[in-house]
Image: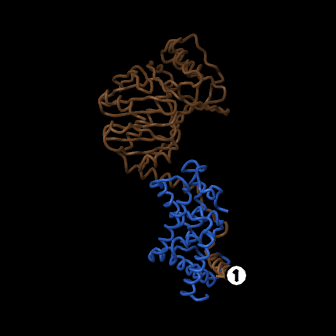
């Protein structure tokens, strides 16, 4: 599990200094963003940008800075995903297929990923974030803390996000 | 929707979301990223070059004024003790004896220049203490705020150099304990908050921390350094002992320090302070139990004191 118990508590006071906060959260945030953009280098760039925003323009409250950081990182990633030019850019940067994959398999896998990303880009930022965090293995409590949602409602929101995702996907691609 | 349907939809979505799983074994390098981040911070602040001298003056003044020790060589693997320096006191002394390696304190690491802060809350979050400013009405307008990371400086005690310095200074009644050789002495400031008005800059830090090997005798060392710098034995011992259980660290200012035109001890509402004037600029340095302040500016003496007294 990537998130610490501090997330569940909605606090990060124990994270101490900014450097500590960076070290504790950078890898997890970058992995999450990589799901959205599909490119490691670009994900690192966006994660660093989220930390930069936190450093230069921190929120008024120091409660749940991790949540602020993750929401900012996901918003940056999803905004980028919605920009077609950038999408073309990252598609060209997508990692080379693994040696075990045939070119056809690699192409199919890339197409499957692109479909999911296009659907995510069509959802609201909150719904896309819910699905991304769950797929990265975060618990309902952690998702609620990170997205600043009522823990009692996050299950309902996720169910709605599932429905919205499937509807959008089927409209675009059918059962494929 | 029925629960079974809900489960089915979740499974369906989960299967597709799994297409985005990150490559197995890939782990972003947080350490390298943090280094790049620090470099970006440094580059960003270089754009604010006019602000750097104010911070540099404050930080260098804190560090070099508070610790003036002989440079040395060697190293010692020892258990460290940490003392909180709650009072900074200044005393005029002679120059370090000629022909002996000059007293130098090296800044440890590369200090990162100041970073702008939007507000006091912003600064507070970064430094983990409440920055204090002069109360309203003393200075016009809101200050530009900056924070820095802490700064450390240090030296290594060299017994041979100390013995030579004692001889050169004509001190014959002092000896240097051989076990001091190679002792690392380091002084650390906390994160500094800098508030800048057009004519005044106020820098503040939590009390300084001094680290040294366990059982290192600070009063004896302070006494010895002060004797080398021309202070009589009784005064040296008194200065080294003063403040009882919270050891003061003395900041020797050489008597012929040519850039300081005048230096005087003054009384602020919060206690004693040292006021130094040089070429139209006044530096006012004082400390309270939980803070060390440097006020630097071009206002006249009375106004500078009024500003210092208004810090709350």
Residue positioned 53% across, 11% down in the render: B234
- Give the left or right position of residue A96, taking residue B119 as reference: right
Residue B249 spot, x, y in % from top left? 53, 25
Name the residue beneath numbered marker 1.
Answer: B4
Residue B228 spot, x, y in % from top left? 51, 17
The chain to which mark 1 is attached is B
Q: Nearer the viewer, residue B203 or B231?
A: B203
Residue positioned 45% across, 44% down in the render: B147
Chain whose colour in the figure is brown: B
- Give the left or right position of residue A56, taking residue B76 as reference: left
Residue positioned 62% across, 22% down in the render: B217
Residue B96 spot, x, y in % from top left? 47, 21
Would you identify the image quadrant in which residue B264 lies?
top left
- Pointer 1 local density, CA inside 10 Å: few below 14, some 14–19, many at least 20: few
Report the colour scheme: by chain
Residue A88 spot, x, y in % from top left? 48, 77
């Amino acid at each position: 599990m990537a998130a610490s118990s501090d997330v569940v508590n909605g606090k990060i006071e124990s994270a101490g200094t900014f450097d500590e906060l960076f070290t504790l959260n950078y890898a997890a945030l970058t992995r999450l963003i990589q799901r959205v953009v599909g490119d490691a280098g670009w994900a690192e760039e966006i994660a660093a940008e989220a930390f930069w925003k936190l450093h230069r323009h921190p929120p008024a409250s120091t409660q749940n800075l991790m949540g602020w950081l993750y929401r900012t990182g996901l918003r940056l990633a999803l905004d980028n995903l919605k920009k077609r030019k950038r999408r073309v850019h990252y598609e060209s940067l997508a990692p080379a297929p693994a040696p075990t994959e045939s070119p056809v398999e690699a192409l199919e896998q890339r197409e499957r990923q692109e479909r999911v990303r296009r659907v995510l880009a069509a959802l609201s930022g909150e719904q896309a974030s819910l699905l991304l965090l769950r797929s990265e293995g975060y618990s309902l409590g952690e998702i609620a803390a990170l997205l600043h949602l009522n823990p009692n409602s996050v299950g309902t929101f996720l169910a709605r996000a599932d429905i919205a995702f499937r509807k959008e996907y089927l409209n675009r691609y059918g059962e494929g | 929707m029925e629960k079974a349907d809900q489960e089915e939809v979740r499974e369906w979505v989960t299967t597709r979301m799994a297409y985005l799983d990150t490559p197995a074994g890939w782990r972003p390098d947080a350490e390298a990223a943090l280094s790049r981040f620090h470099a970006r911070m440094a580059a960003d602040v270089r754009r604010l070059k006019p602000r750097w001298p104010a911070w540099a003056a404050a930080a260098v003044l804190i560090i070099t004024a508070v610790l003036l020790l002989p440079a040395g060589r060697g190293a010692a693997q020892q258990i460290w003790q940490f003392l909180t320096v709650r009072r900074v006191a200044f005393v005029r002394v002679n120059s370090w004896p000629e022909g002996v390696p000059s007293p130098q304190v090296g800044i440890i690491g590369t200090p990162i220049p100041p970073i702008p802060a939007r507000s006091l809350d912003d600064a507070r979050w970064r430094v983990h203490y409440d920055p204090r400013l002069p109360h309203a009405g003393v200075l016009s307008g809101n200050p530009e705020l900056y924070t820095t990371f802490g700064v450390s400086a240090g030296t290594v005690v060299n017994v041979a150099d100390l013995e030579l310095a004692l001889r050169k200074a004509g001190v014959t009644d002092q000896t240097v304990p051989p076990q001091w050789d190679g002792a690392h002495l380091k002084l650390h400031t906390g994160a500094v908050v800098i508030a800048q008005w057009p004519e005044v800059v106020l820098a503040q830090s939590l009390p300084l921390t001094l680290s040294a090997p366990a059982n290192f005798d600070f009063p004896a060392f302070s006494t010895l350094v002060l004797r080398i710098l021309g202070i009589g034995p009784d005064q040296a011992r008194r200065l080294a002992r003063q403040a009882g259980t919270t050891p003061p660290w003395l900041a020797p200012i050489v008597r012929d320090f040519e850039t300081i035109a005048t230096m005087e001890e003054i009384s602020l509402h919060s206690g004693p302070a040292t006021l130094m004037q040089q070429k139209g600029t006044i530096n006012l340095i004082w400390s309270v139990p939980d803070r060390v302040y440097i006020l630097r500016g071009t206002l006249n003496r009375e106004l500078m004191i009024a500003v210092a007294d208004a810090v709350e």
